[in-house]
Image (tube, grey):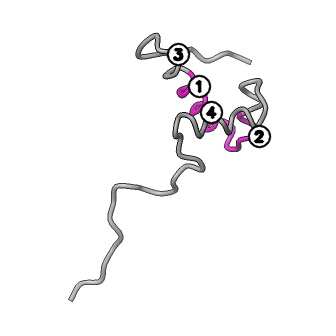
């Protein structure tokens, strides 16, 4: 298994923690599996999701497009 390279915008520890949590959640698809990837408990990851205000579960579909409306 290859370890992905982590590119950080700064040396800010909170930013790095948020980025790692988001990557793990995106890769694993569930809190349980993401916690395993990070080597923490599900509860510890849930606390970090709340702390960093990470949207979970991820919104589905394009968020920027308005719903289609029927014309006259």
Vertical arrangement, residue 16 with respect to residue 21, above or below: above
| Residue that badge 4 annotates | 48
Q: Is residue 25 left or right of residue 70?
A: right
Q: Callout 3: few (<14), some (14-19), or many (20+) C-alpha neighbours within 10 Å?
A: few
Q: Is residue 45 left or right of residue 10?
A: right
Label 4, label 1: how many angstroms apart (C-alpha)? 11 Å
**Front label number (4 vs 2):** 4
SS assignment at label 3? helix
Label 3, label 4: how many angstroms apart (C-alpha)? 13 Å
Please tell me which residue lies in front, 61 or 48: 48
- Tell whether position 1 is magenta: no
**Front label number (4 vs 1):** 4
Span colored in magenta: 17-34
The C terminus sits in image quarter: bottom left
Closer to the N terminus: mark 4 or mark 2?
Answer: 2
| Residue that badge 1 annotates | 20
| Residue that badge 3 annotates | 13
Q: Callout 4: few (<14), some (14-19), or many (20+) C-alpha neighbours within 10 Å?
A: some
Label 3, label 1: how many angstroms apart (C-alpha)? 11 Å
């Amino acid at each position: 298994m290859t370890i992905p390279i982590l590119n950080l915008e700064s040396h800010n520890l909170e930013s790095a923690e948020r980025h790692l949590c988001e990557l793990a959640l995106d890769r694993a698809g569930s809190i349980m599996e993401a916690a395993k990837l990070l080597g923490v408990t599900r509860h510890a990851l849930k606390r970090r999701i709340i702390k960093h205000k990470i949207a979970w579960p991820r919104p589905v579909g394009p968020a920027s497009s308005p719903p289609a409306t029927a014309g006259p």
